[in-house]
Structures are given as C-alpha cells and as structure tokens.
C-alpha cells in the first residue's frame, strides 16, 4: 500500500487545485487519485466565475468579459460594466492540461483507480493508498435533506453561425425571455468567443430535470425566435444538473477525512456558482497544512448568506417570488459591483439587506410564514 501525507481523491476543479497547491509548496507528500478514462470521468464542462485581477489559473482562462447583458422577461435589455470584476470562463479540458503541466514539475504521484470507499482512518479502498489526511472531492449528497431541493439544470450548445451574430466583448449573462416554468425560473446564457462562435445555454431552476427533447426544443426556440441566429452548426454539447439546496454538506466526514469543493459545500445554493469557492477552500487547506494546523476546509459561505439563499430558494419553489423579475431587477436596482459580490458570497450585512430589499416584501413574508407553518 502506498502511504502519503495527503491523498486527494478526484481530479476535478477542487481536487486539481489542491493537488497543485500542495505540490508546488512542497510541504507534504501528495497522492492524487483520479478515475481512469471512461464513464467514471465527467464530460467536458465549462466553469465561470467573477474575478478581480489575475487568478491562479490564468493559463486556463478561455475567455473573459468586462461587460455583461441582461434581458428582462419583457425584452428590456441592459448592459453592465463589471469593473473592477471580469466574468471568466474556464473549460475543463484546458484546466486539466494546465494542471497536468504544473503537477509534472512537482513530486505529486498520480494514481488511476475506481475508489470503493474511504475509511475514517484514511485508507482509500480500491486505490491501495492511505494518507494521514484524505480530501474527497467526488460528488456527494448532503448530510440530511434540506427544506428545499431545487436543481440548476441546463443544456448548452457551442455554435458556429453562418454570419456574424455575437459581440465577443459582451457576455449574455441572463436572458429571461424564454417561457418561465411554474415554481422556478428559466433563462439563457450567451458566452461569445468570436463574432460567429459562442456557448448558448438554456438553464432552469426547478425541482426536476427535463427530457432531452424538452431541452432541445427550448434551445431551438430561443436561438431561432429570440436570438435569431440564423443558420448555425452545433460544435459541442454540454449538459448537467447542479443541486440548489439549503441542506448541509459536511466538510469533515472522518478523523482524517474531509470533503472539498461541491461535496464540501462550495456550490452557492442560490446561483450554482462553485469554481471560485472551491479555489478558496483549496487555498485555505494548503495554507493550514503548510502552517501545521488542522486542515478542515473552511465554510465556503457564511451562515448569513446560506440563510438568505435558503429563503430565496423557498420563495422560488413556493411560487411566491417571480425569479425572472427578481434577478433582472437585481442588476437594475443595485450597483453592479454589489450584485457581483452578492453572487460570489462576499457582501457585508448592510449590502445583503440592500440586495434583499430588491425582492418584493410580500413574497418574502409569505415565504417566511409558509416556512413557519411547515415546522
């Protein structure tokens, strides 16, 4: 059996971030356990985040935008300058290639294996590896069900149009012109990389995923009738579902075993953003190990932000809040920098109160009362 100071299980955004940091600081022997090629490995996917200044993965950034566009359900269009932030897009394939190059310059040992389970004392069964500390970044369910459980589910096409159809300098962040589902919200993304190429993605916040033909129908209608792209070729397809819940995700699951990334609560419940929080957790763990402290990952978001997210999700799920109007109005009624920091979970209490004031008070009150009656 191979023994190490640290074993990282999973080679997604969080696992690779932690392995690279630990390998480059050289303060511990590290083994990275990743699934072998095949169905156990996730498909190509895209990660987006808000970023101010250069980040840790500049070589993996596929595109960044300094301006975004929001379309209200009525069709009203607004463009917002993001300074000092930028909206950053990273493709998982690029991220993995950059990580592989960084890891090749370190002493990190990479092992391919299908992990059966991880024992509380740090043995990774199926990989024949054991560690003083083990960080499991594979998807995992919450510790217990929450009061609300929605999904952010989506299908996106990378398209190439026959004629110029996009402004590469502006990302279409939220387009609420698609028909809205009951008890949820639907919107489109447009992330252009050239005048003729973009990722166009249809997204819903709702209780269950759609059938394949429903995603296809929504994308066809939106790209043809709303975006009016004209003839285009689909170069790639991506699809997924991200849990949006107020359920707790434990970060410590054994004396020596931790969860990191989405499994450790890095997904923001109200937005689905994960990438930036996973990077913050990896940085904190690496710092703790270097300084000889207990390396339990920190909470990705404050208790206050999680309570706010739970309230917002219950308002959407209960049909008390018109999600499309709320999110579109958020940008209109609040300074852009405040909205971006709210989406990232870094706002102050005063700013949070200002943001929540953008929501109809009657809707929030009905949500609180409904929650009290359910207890």
Image: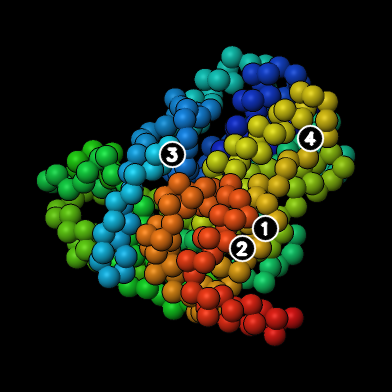
**Mark 3 = which residue?**
85
The residue positioned 38% from the left and 43% from the top of the image is 82
**Colour approach in the figure:** rainbow
Contact, mark 4 vs mark 3 (Cβ under 8 Å):
no
**Residue 156 position within the rendered picture, expressed as x and y whole percent measured from the top left:** 36, 53
**Residue 322 position within the rendered picture, expressed as x and y whole percent measured from the top left:** 44, 74
Say few, some or many: other residues with alpha carbon within 10 Å of mark 3 (under 14 / 14 to 19 / 20 or more): many
What whole-number distance in Å separates the C-alpha atoms at marks 2 and 1?
6 Å
The residue positioned 47% from the left and 52% from the top of the image is 339
**Mark 2 = which residue?**
308
Which quadrant holds the C terminus?
bottom right
Is 207 placed above or below 14 here?
Answer: below
Tell me the SS state at disc 1: helix
Q: Earlier in the sequence, mark 4 or mark 3?
A: 3
Q: Of discs 4 and 1, which sits in the foreground?
A: 1
What whole-number distance in Å separates the C-alpha atoms at marks 4 and 3?
30 Å
Tell me the SS state at disc 3: loop
Left or right of 93, for residue 231: left
Label ID, residue 295: 4
Q: Earlier in the sequence, mark 1 or mark 3?
A: 3
What whole-number distance in Å separates the C-alpha atoms at marks 3 and 2?
23 Å
Numbered-mark total: 4
**Residue 281 position within the rendered picture, expressed as x and y whole percent measured from the top left:** 66, 39
Say few, some or many: other residues with alpha carbon within 10 Å of mark 4 (under 14 / 14 to 19 / 20 or more): many
């Amino acid at each position: 059996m191979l023994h190490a100071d640290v074993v990282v299980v999973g080679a997604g955004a969080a696992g690779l971030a932690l392995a690279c940091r630990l390998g480059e600081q050289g303060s511990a022997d590290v083994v990275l356990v990743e699934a072998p090629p095949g169905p156990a490995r996730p498909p190509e996917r895209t990660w987006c985040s808000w970023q101010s200044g250069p980040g840790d993965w500049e070589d993996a950034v596929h595109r960044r935008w300094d301006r975004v566009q929001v379309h209200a359900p009525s069709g009203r269009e607004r463009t917002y300058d993001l300074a000092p932030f930028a909206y950053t897009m990273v493709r998982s394939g690029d991220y993995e290639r950059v990580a592989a190059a960084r890891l090749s310059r370190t002493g990190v040992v990479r092992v391919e294996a299908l992990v059966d389970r991880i024992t509380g004392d740090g043995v990774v069964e199926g990989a024949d590896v054991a560690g003083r500390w083990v960080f499991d970044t594979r998807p995992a369910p919450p510790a217990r069900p929450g009061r609300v459980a929605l999904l952010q589910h989506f299908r996106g096409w990378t398209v190439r149009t026959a004629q110029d159809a996009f402004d590469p300098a502006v990302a279409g962040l939220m387009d609420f012109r698609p028909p809205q589902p009951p008890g949820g919200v639907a919107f489109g993304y447009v992330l252009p990389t050239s005048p003729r190429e973009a990722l166009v993605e249809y997204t819903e916040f709702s209780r269950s995923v759609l059938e394949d033909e429903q995603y296809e129908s929504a994308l066809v209608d939106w790209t043809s009738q709303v975006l009016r792209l004209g003839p285009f070729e689909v170069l790639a397809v991506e699809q997924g579902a991200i849990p949006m819940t107020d359920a707790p995700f434990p970060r410590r699951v054994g004396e020596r075993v931790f969860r990191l990334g989405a499994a450790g609560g890095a997904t923001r419940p109200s937005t689905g953003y994960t990438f930036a929080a996973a990077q913050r957790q990896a940085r904190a763990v690496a710092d703790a190990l270097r300084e000889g402290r207990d390396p339990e990952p920190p909470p990705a978001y404050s208790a206050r932000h999680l309570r706010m997210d739970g309230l917002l999700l219950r308002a959407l799920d209960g049909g008390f809040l018109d999600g499309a109007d709320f999110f579109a109005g958020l940008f209109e009624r609040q300074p852009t920098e405040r909205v971006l920091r709210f989406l990232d979970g870094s706002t102050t209490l005063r700013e949070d109160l200002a943001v929540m004031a953008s929501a109809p008070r009657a809707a929030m009150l009905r949500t609180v009362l409904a929650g009290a009656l359910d207890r």
